[in-house]
Amino acid sequence: MSDKLVDRRNLDFLLFELLGIARITESDYYRDHSRETFQMALDTAYQVAREVFWPSYQTFDRNPAHFDGEKTIVPEPMHAIWKEAGEGGWFAVTMPYEQGGQQFPSVIQLATALMFNAANTSAEMYIGLTSGAGGLIASFGSDKLKDLFMTRLFSGEWAGTMALTEPQAGSSLSDIKT
């Protein structure tokens, strides 16, 4: 097994030199951040990916989530990953502070998700789908739905997912016709 999940030197070059993401902190919305806060988030995400996500990827592959007739059973390591994601704020990386988020730009969220995904794709899907469900409600939900779901989703108290079905394709995206 490789000790390196992603090439941080290359990622940092792309983010800070090529894209120049630190310039985004000149806008009022991101003024609380700096290259240092972005770097800290990336360093922390890499550490979490390496120490929490990575050790269990084979367990997820061998023991996928399943429904036992009454409840859904997830691989045992998901409980620790979920707790870490909630405590670390990884469900709401891009969301505004007022909504329980870290108010980072999307490119930082994408970079952290890349690290989690490199370490354990299955576990990252739980985090990403919950974050996506919360973001959808934040963007389009009524105030009642926002009050009910957002805090619980962004803290990790509740999970979110996506369900897709099309009349002619079921859940097969490649078979959808427009």
Image (cartoon, grey):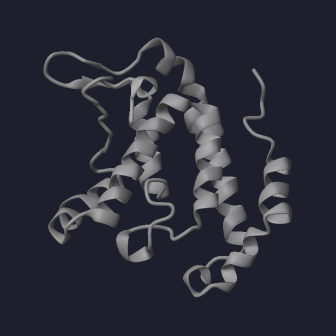
The spot of residue 95 in percent (x, y) is 45, 67
Residue 132 left/right relative to 21:
left
- Residue at 62% x, 33% y is 119
Task: In the displayed orientation, state which residue is furthest to the top.
Answer: 62
The spot of residue 102 in percent (x, y) is 50, 68
Q: Classify the position of the N terminus by image quarter.
A: top right
The spot of residue 109 in percent (x, y) is 58, 56
Q: Classify the position of the C terminus by image quarter.
A: top left
Task: In the displayed orientation, state which residue is furthest to the front.
Answer: 178
User: Residue 171 is drawn in which quadrant?
Assistant: top left
- Residue at 29% x, 59% y is 137
The number of discs equals 0
- Residue at 81% x, 42% y is 7
> Which residue is more in the foreground, 132 or 84?
132
- Residue at 32% x, 40% y is 161
The spot of residue 81 in percent (x, y) is 46, 39
Residue 10 left/right relative to 79:
right
User: Residue 76 is drawn in which quadrant?
Assistant: top left
Residue 80 left/right relative to 37:
left
Q: Is residue 54 above or below residue 81?
A: above
